[in-house]
Image (spheres, rainbow, N blue to C red):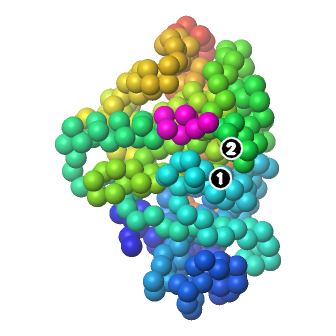
Amino acid sequence: MTHEGNPARPVRDEDAFDVEAVAAWLREHAEEFREDLVGTPEVRQFPGGASNLTYLLAYPSRDLILRRPPAGVKAASAHDMGREYRIQSALAPVFPYVPRMVGHCRDESVIGSEFYVMERLDGTILRRDLPWPLSEDEASALCARALDVLVALHSVDVAAYPDLAKLGRGEGYVGRQVSGWIDRFGKARTDDTGDWSDITAWIEEHQPADVGQRLIHNDFRFDNMVLDGELRIVGVLDWEMATVGDPLMDVGGMLAYWVEAGDDEFFQMFRRQPTTVPGMWTRDQIVERYCERMGFSVTPEQWRFYEVFGLFRLAVIAQQIWYRYYHRQTTNEAYAVFGPAVAYLEKRCRQILASTGATGSTREGR
């Protein structure tokens, strides 16, 4: 099986692990799959993503996926393999877009960290550029299907499933996110980090109350979806940040990655999904149609918070990765662009706020 749009590559030296140790662990613990786990699998690494590491375990009769955290300094609540495994296991009965779980290893002595293994979904993952052409109607239909899946996720009756309900901490999700991401940003600062104080002050001052407590993915994008040959979504991946909280925050986070054809040249460099092709919906269209489906009434002025916070959150994620590269905790040269990316996002946040008269600052970062 192959995933178009995200071909697995040889494992980077710094990300290598004891393959035979994993194979032995699987033979002992993955009873349901044991007959397919013959010998030692061929291991390759997926290049997409900059958070948890993802590998292909290719056995002769079955492909599996292994997920593990990277080396280096990490946010305390991030990279929790057990949590990611449990969320997908709990979701399986009510949300038919998660891969089948194989096993979770808590024993860090096996490969130096926790890890979990799941079945590989067969299909295509869309990356920066389409692997085949789409008509405008097909591109629009793909946006509609993605919205359907997001609405389905946000419509899960969390209270009816104790394993999902316990992900939530009750009202105040927006406030916890604001304070939490500002704190993460402070801990990940480097000598070249710009001054975000006016932006974070605006975010704190304009944070709204939660619109609800729903199951949210927190990294919902085309490059975290698997499509079949009919462009139907058959899987949603990367559940490491999923939780119960305000669904509009999920949409804001999604649209921070949604680059349109008319966006400036630097923002085009952020594009990780084919959202610029003709027929793809705009960010405004997604907000309007999502709110219609979910029954939310949100004005453009109210949406400004979710837009700015989504970009700030993206900047924090980039800064955390830049911190690892800056301090040589990783030698992956692909991470060299994250420093300039943080500076650009700082500028973009200010442009949005200045367009509404929210701030007169013209400061730029590094």
Whether residue 156 appears in magenta in the rendering, the answer is: yes
The range drawn in magenta is 151-157
Q: Quadrant of residue 207?
A: top right
Which residue is most to the front? 160
Mark 1 to mark 2 CA distance (whole Å): 8 Å
Q: Quadrant of residue 286?
A: top left
Which of 355 and 66 lies nearest the eye of the viewer?
Answer: 66
Q: Secondary structure at mark 2?
A: loop
Which of 298 and 352 lies nearest the eye of the viewer?
Answer: 298
Q: Looking at numbered disc 1 in the image, what kind of residue is underneath it? A: Ala
Question: In the figure, 256 relative to 14: above or below?
Answer: above
Q: Looking at numbered disc 2 in the image, what kind of residue is underneath it? A: Tyr
Question: In the figure, 42 relative to 360: above or below?
Answer: below
Q: Is residue 239 visible?
A: no
Which is nearer the N-term, disc 1 or disc 2? 1
Question: In the figure, 131 relative to 219: above or below?
Answer: below
Residue density around tag 1, few if under 14, some if 14–19, many if 20 or more, within 10 Å: some
327 sits to left or right of 64: right
Quarter that holds the C terminus: top right
Whether residue 324 appears in magenta in the rendering, the answer is: no
Tell me, yes or no, whether the two marked residues, 1 and 2, touch with CB atoms within 8 Å. Answer: yes
Which residue is most to the left? 135
Q: Which residue is mark 1?
A: 90
Which of 63 and 30 lies nearest the eye of the viewer?
Answer: 30
Question: In the figure, 347 relative to 353: above or below?
Answer: below
Q: Quadrant of residue 315?
A: top right
Residue density around tag 2, few if under 14, some if 14–19, many if 20 or more, within 10 Å: some
Q: Is residue 297 visible?
A: yes
Point 36% across, 59% down: residue: 124
Q: Position of residue 324 (x, y in %)?
A: 69, 55
Point 72% across, 29% down: residue: 173
Q: Which residue is mark 2?
A: 161
